[in-house]
Structure formats: C-alpha cells, structure tokens
Image (spheres, rainbow, N blue to C red):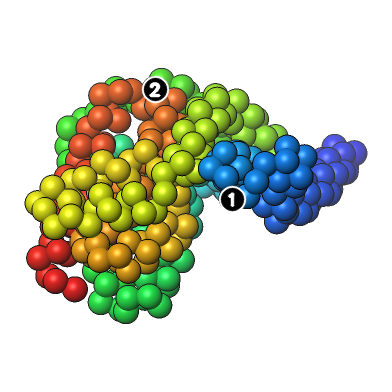
Amino acid sequence: MASTVKRRDDHDRRDFNLVGLAALAWVLGFANLQTIADFLTYRLLGLSAESHLGQSVNFFLYDVPKILMLLAAMIFMITLLRTFITPEQTRRWLGGRREGVGNLLAALLGVVTPFCSCSAVPLFIGFVESGVPLGVTFSFLVTAPMVNEIALVMLFGMFGWKIAGLYMLSGLTIAIVSGVVIGRLGMEREVEDFVYQVNVNRRMQNPEERLSWHDRFSQALDSTRDIVGKVWPYVLVGIAVGAGIHGFVPDQFLAETLGRDTIWAVPAAVVLGVPLYSNAAGIIPVVSVLMDKGVALGTVLAFMMSVVALSLPEMIILRRVLKPRLIGLYIGIVALGIIATGYLFNLMHF
C-alpha cells in the first residue's frame, strides 16, 4: 500500500513538472507570436508590410498558431477543471434554473471571458457535453466574442459610459433572447454527435472515486488531442478566409459603403461584417475610423457586432460542431437582433 501511494505521488510530481514546463513554453511562445509572424512574413518571405498580400500572410501566420494555442490551452484547462466538477453540478449552475436565468448567467460568463469567436468554441463544446441546455450554451457563444471587458473599456474611453453601457446591454439582450429561442426550438439533434461523445471525465462517472493528478492531467491531454484533432482543419480554412479579407478590404471602402444615410445601411453593415474576422478589441479602431468618416453609430455598432459574433471563420469552425440547420438558425436570430440594435442606436441619435 505504501509503495502504491509513493508511486502515485511520484507520478503526480513528474506530471506537475511536465505541465509546468509546457505552460512556460506556451507563455513564451504566445508572447512572441507576432515577432515570429513578422520575421516569417517580412524577412523570410520578403513580403512588404504595406502590401495587401503581406498583411494577409502576416495575419494568417499570427492567427493560426494563436487560435490553435488558445484552443489547446482552454480545452486542457476546462477539462482539468471539470475533473473536480461533475456534469450534474454544471447542469445545476447553468441549466437547473428558470428559463432566462441560466441564459443570463451564461451571457454574463461570456462578458468576463475575453475570447474571440473561434476560441469560445471549446467552452461551448464543454457546456454541451456537460449537459447544459443548448439554448444556454448559445447565450454564452454570443456574448463571449461580442461583449468583453477589453471592448467595454475601449468603448468607454472613446465614446463615454452611455454608449459602452448600451452596447453591453444590447449584447446581453441579443444573447439571452437568442438562447431562449434556440432552447425552445429543441435543436439538440442538430449538434454533431461527437460533441456528446467526447470521452472525457470517464472516471468521474463514479463520484466516489478520487482521481490522482496523473489521471486528471491524462484526461485533459486526451480531450485536448481529441477536440483539436477534429477542429484544426476548420480553423485553418476559417482564418485563411479572414486573412484574405483582412488584407484586401480597405477601411475606406467600408466607410463609403456604410456611410450612405439609407434604411439599408444597417443590414448592409451586418452583411459586410460577416466575412471579416477580428475580436471586439481589434475591431474598435476600425469603428473609430468609420465614425470619424461620418458613419452613424448604430450602423457602426451593427458592423462591429456582426464581425465578432457572426464572422465567417467562426461559422466554418462551428460547422465541425453544429449541423447546417442550427448554424443557419443561429445566424438568422443573432443577425435580426444586431439589426434591431443598429436601428435603435441610430434612432437615438448619439
């Protein structure tokens, strides 16, 4: 018995050391991604930083490892955390409440998680697999990229507390309403089967069994390999699309297109925003440029919301998780909410 305990402690100690080294390598690599992308793009490949091709290639070489590293890290940490939390607890916290309350909690969780749309996918998968109602998970999926503390601080600094507050309120409203509608429609069959079958927490099926750290780390690593292995091709395609548009669609074109004072300006902003790819903080400088060029605030915010909540790269990645019917429904509901928000802000004449 004593030798078994000692062997278990040795395994735990070794695994802690390996995970610590891996975390250090991750942090160092992540901190230098832009430097590496710049070196590969502008020195090794010899592309110009002023050219459209150079900007697109640099965007791709930076964002592919960034998203894959975030995916891997988040899946690992979430799975590790979930070895301490049973699916029943997760369902009780987010799902076992009155309709709307769980959606509100999930939406608020999305506000404080500073992820772009693509890196919110692993949390979405984790919620679904844990038995959290589908509508509640969608409330999180909308707010995680659309509304976060960085975007709110930047909006507050540029436009004041009223606009920042209204933006947060509108984002939460869209997320809650979207989640409630999708939840009532009973679309669970429109989620790909593997999401329900990802084999994590196998040994947590017996709540009486105490896992060692070695077991917890093993489960986290297995889950990371499984999910990243299924999703990475979609990440590459999605970011490639976003990179092409990022480099070849100038701000001036957006300003001229969205600046027309017509009833179609807000829907046009949503349509134009969908193919782009950025997080809320990254798109805010573009928001500033568009407003300086005279584009109405509601139109600009509708554009911003569609970029971060309905980006084409996100939809491509989500296709690995959701079936087309549910993706289409998600796009339609969120798009209608964003359009309504855009018209509302324009009517208020900020």
The residue under the point 47% across, 57% down is 282
Secondary structure of the residue carrying tag 1 is loop
Does 37 sit left or right of 258 as displayed? right
Residue 259 appears in the picture as rendered: yes
Do tag 1 and tag 2 residues touch (Cβ < 8 Å)?
Answer: no
Q: Label 1: few (<14), some or many (≥20) within 10 Å?
A: few
Q: Residue at x 73, y 41 (%)?
A: 46
- Could you tell me which quadrant the N terminus lies in? top right
Q: Earlier in the sequence, mark 1 or mark 2?
A: 1
- Check disc 1 and give the amino acid type: Glu
Q: Which residue position holds label 1? A: 50
Which element is circle 2 on?
loop
142 or 246, which lies in front? Answer: 246
Residue at image coords 42%, 30%: 316
| Quadrant location, the C terminus | bottom left
Q: Which picture quadrant has residue 157?
A: bottom left
Dot in front, 1 or 2: 1
Q: Is residue 280 visible?
A: no
Q: How many marks?
A: 2
What residue is drawn where x is 37% and y is 38%?
A: 275
Counting from the top left corner in percent of width and height, residue 278 is at: 45, 49
Q: Relative to residue 131, is residue 297 drawn left or right?
A: left
* Callout 2 amino acid: Glu
